[in-house]
Image (tube, rainbow, N blue to C red):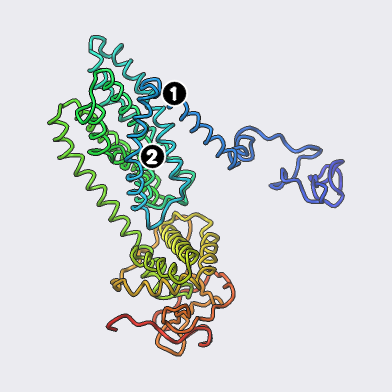
Amino acid sequence: MPHGTPYGGPYGDPSGVPYSDSSGGPYPWFAAGAAPTGWPHPPRQGWWGPGGRLARLWDNRALRATALTSLLSLSGLIILALVREQTGTKGFMVGLGLAVLPVPLIIAVFRWLDRVDPKPWRNLLFAFAWGACAATLVALIANGFATEWLMTTVDSSSSSGRADAWGATFVAPFVEESAKAAAVLLLFLFRRRDFNGLVDGVVVAGITATGFAFTENILYLGSAFVSDQTLGYSGIRSTTAATFFIRAVMSPFAHPLFTSMTGVGFGIAAATARHQRVRRVLIPIAMLLTAMVLHGVWNASATLGGYGFLIVYALFMVPMFGLLTWLTLWSRAKELRAVREQLTAYQAAGWLTPPEPIALSSMRARGIARDLARRTQGAAGARTVGEYTAYATSLAFLRRQAYRGTAGPDFTTREKVLLDRLWERRETAQPALAHAALSVPLPRPRRVPRPAPGTMPAPFWPAGPHGGGYGYGYGAGQGPGYGSGNGYGYGQQPQYGVQPVYAPWATPPPPGPQPPTTPPTAHTTSVPHRPGS
């Protein structure tokens, strides 16, 4: 090759490969085009942009986890020192012991709401730690500076109590809700696969606010205990008892209620199509402002006296809490309905048996399937059914995201992985779910929503597991063979084949009854019948 051409010169490779390494392949720096003539070394990488040094550091998951853990640990140590300085060691221990009492109940409530598609514990631990450490530290410092500024700048003649009231009503809601919303935003951006809808937003926001309220209660209860020790109060008439009753008995969900408004906004944004960018940005901001208003009204009620506080509590906070609870339960029921609707395509293609979409759309049927597997195959069987349920739910939500245009370009890869995991656990889970489906009333048919316009096409009809077709697996009997020989009384064990070949470009089946795509001997011929059928 003549000198001066892109692949020639004194530094070129005789084989024509530019700047080849020891194995003969080209260096990655020149993968996008020809190297400059006579350039002996790779170009210098900058700090910013694709391939930059900071970008490579950010892509290191271990480094990100270490930095985040260090930040939260440092914030926790600073919070510990500040609270202990205000309450003393004894007050801190009393406040800690009382503040931890409502935490398990609140977390259990949010985990119950999240039963359809439980979030990983690492996400919830991060949310709680952020609220208890980072958000509390930001709020404690910012609220202190804001109160001092109000006293010295806005109204220097005002008393300290008046400045505290102004700060609690106008400054604290803005600072605290913004600090708590940062955890929801981080999980929304960097754990996007675990953020599917409104329920996820409410759960993440509620756990974050629970951590914030936990640390705040330590401070309030510890300070109240120190005050009682100074004034000689004790028992049920003490300030500590009154503070515990108001914060842990009457309003343990106050902070979770405020921050859940922000979670609702991010949940709606997660369910919004990618091309609706304005809505995806404005709705979380609007719901964050709603959280600030609710927080400000709640703090202002404390300055109205006992009756004013009770009026705001009964006429404003309780209805809002009831509305949020109804909205979350309605959204969870909608998620279960989406599971049944989206899994129907995989049932028709032969990946799932006909009873499974019905059983997987009922929390009661899921529990029955796990209990049945536990009685027959022990804890390992129950765990397998639980894993099968989780993967099937993730598969349904992934297909729903594809219809909305929010699944991303890796939809096919993720779908194949989930189908492989379901196939590995089918022998244990499918008979148990078939039995559990008998306890669920048949749902009324619903129309599957049309795909939302987006950058990626609608999800393709899944290929069947027995050779790429859409086989229903009908044998010589009346229906599909999903029986088992494990004592369920549904006939002999079906002959499960080898791992299916995944073909995402399969053609949807035509309407009407379809002939079997596999020999009748590959499936059983017995079918469980519903009582009365």
- Disc 1 designates what residue? 81
Residue, x 32% and y 59% (percent of image)? 334
Residue 376 screen position, x and y as percent: 45, 72
> For the residue marked with disc 2, what is the amino acid?
Thr
Q: Vertical placement of 159 versus 192: above or below?
A: above
Would you say residue 389 is visible in this rendering? yes
Q: Vertical placement of 425 versus 300: above or below?
A: below
Q: Is 218 placed left or right of 499 in the picture?
A: left
Instruction: Give the quarter of the image for residue 252.
Output: top left
Q: Distance between the residues labelled 1 and 2?
A: 21 Å
Q: Vertical placement of 344 versus 282: above or below?
A: below
Residue sitting farthest toward the top: 157
Q: Is 231 placed left or right of 488 in the picture?
A: left
Would you say residue 268 is visible in this rendering? no
Mark identifier at residue 208: 2
Residue 297 screen position, x and y as percent: 22, 32
Q: Vertical placement of 177 versus 442: above or below?
A: above
Residue 310 screen position, x and y as percent: 15, 35
